Image (tube, rainbow, N blue to C red):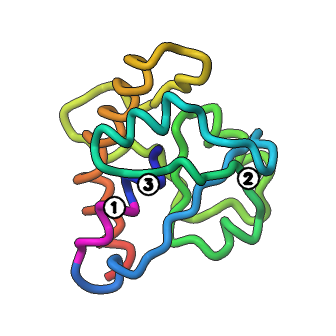
Amino acid sequence: MAAALLQHALAVEPGPLQGCRVVSAGVVARAGDAVTPHSVAALRKVGLDIAGHRSRPLTQAMMDGALAVLCMTEGHREMIRLRADPVPRHLYLFREFIEATPEREIGDPFGGPAPLYEAVRDEMVEAIPGLVRRLRELAG
């Protein structure tokens, strides 16, 4: 969900961010798993279609070529710090750039009810403006 929301936001950005490709990968993901129906439904409600998305594990090559690597939780960020060589220079939490909120992590809704997926979607949407501002700084 995060990748689709961020890609959608970047598509209307002027300059180099408009052409940025957002890649979704997980620190414990298996290759080829389908996205959950609740994820599909949560994004359809905001006009995005992720039905064809398939999971993939995060690789060093992905990190090496990234403008930034974004994590949902501190645990994910720590796993990357322990495994990556080199550790990505720009390794952030997705919600790290929201000024007025103490909650920086986004929980995994997997296995939860549809309203939980929608709440997680909304947490991601809330993070997009600050995240885009930071990506502008990095790309500029």
Q: Secondary structure at mark 3?
A: helix
Mark 2–mark 1 Cα distance, whole angstroms, equals 20 Å
Q: Nearer the viewer, residue 52 or 56?
A: 52
Q: Which mark is residue 121?
A: none
Whether residue 116 sits left or right of residue 60 in the image: it is: left
Q: Quadrant of residue 46?
A: top left
How crowded is the residue under tag 2: few (<14 C-alpha within 10 Å), some, or many (20+)?
A: some
Above or below residue 113? Residue 27 is below
Above or below residue 22? Residue 50 is above
Instruction: Say which amino acid is labelled 3.
Output: Ala
The residue located at (33%, 78%) in the rendering is: 18
Image spot of residue 104 (x, y percent): 39, 32
The residue located at (74%, 65%) in the rendering is: 86
Q: Secondary structure at mark 1?
A: helix
Q: Nearer the viewer, residue 23 or 53?
A: 53
Disc 1, disc 3: CB below 8 Å?
A: yes
Q: Secondary structure at mark 2?
A: loop
* Region in magenta: 7-13
Image spot of residue 129 (x, y percent): 23, 53
Q: Nearer the viewer, residue 6 or 115?
A: 115
Instruction: Say which amino acid is labelled 2.
Output: Arg
Image spot of residue 5 (x, y percent): 37, 52
How crowded is the residue under tag 1: few (<14 C-alpha within 10 Å), some, or many (20+)?
A: some
Q: Which mark is residue 4?
A: 3
Could you tell me which quadrant the C terminus lies in? Answer: bottom left
Q: Is residue 92 magenta?
A: no
Instruction: Say which amino acid is labelled 1.
Output: His
Residue assigned mark 1: 8
Q: Which mark is residue 56?
A: 2
Disc 3, disc 2: CB below 8 Å?
A: no
The residue located at (38%, 57%) in the rendering is: 6
Above or below residue 14? Residue 23 is above
